[in-house]
Image: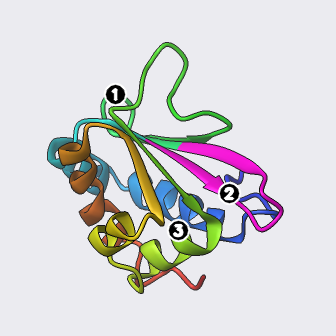
Amino acid sequence: MSLKEDAWPSSAAFDLIADALKNDAERKAAMKQAPFIFGFTLKNDKNETKSWYIDLKKTGSVGKDKTAPEGETAVVTLSLKDVDFAKLVSGKGKPQQMFMTGKLKLQGDMMKATKIEPILQKVQTKAKL
């Protein structure tokens, strides 16, 4: 099942992240490095929003349509425009700068939000967004 949604072109990155987490060693390393659930809410060019999550707390999986798996809560939810998420995962956008300029909004534990950066960096070379 693809995590990509056509109205959110950068959502293809969630498929790349899910593929990276299929590798047992990569998944275990990511879960050890950042044992949390990260939520993402993206806004497309039509002002519609959609949510995804990366569960590194229990399953090492990626899902969509909500910011956390059933019965769980994301430690932090990152909200940004689809185009800005594309910049973030491609390495063309700096998370701290995006946050300071209001392009990236955080809800939850800001310090734990920094733990997702190495996970996103794993797919930067594959992200053609």
Q: Residue 67 appears at what percent x and percent y?
A: 53, 35
Q: Residue 15 appears at what percent x and percent y?
A: 58, 60
Label 1 Cα crowd, 10 Å radius (few <14 / some 14-19 / many 20+): few
Q: Is residue 88 magenta?
A: no
Q: Quadrant of residue 14?
A: bottom right
At label 2, which amino acid type do we have? Lys
**Residue at position x 21%, y 44% from top?**
112
In this view of the protein, which residue sits in the foreground, 11 or 21?
11
Q: Earlier in the sequence, mark 1 or mark 3?
A: 1
Q: Which disc is residue 58 wearing?
A: 1
Q: Which disc is residue 43 wearing?
A: 2
Q: Is residue 48 magenta?
A: yes
Q: Which disc is residue 32 wearing?
A: none
Please tell me whether mark 1 or mark 3 is closer to you in this view: 3
At label 1, which amino acid type do we have? Lys
Q: Quadrant of residue 28?
A: top left
Q: Quadrant of residue 59?
A: top left
Please name the residue that numbered disc 3 is placed on.
85
Circle 3 SS class:
helix
CA gap between label 2 and label 3 equals 9 Å
CA gap between label 1 and label 2 equals 27 Å
Circle 2 SS class:
strand
At label 3, which amino acid type do we have? Phe
Circle 1 SS class:
loop
**Residue at position x 63%, y 66% from top?**
82
Label 2 Cα crowd, 10 Å radius (few <14 / some 14-19 / many 20+): many
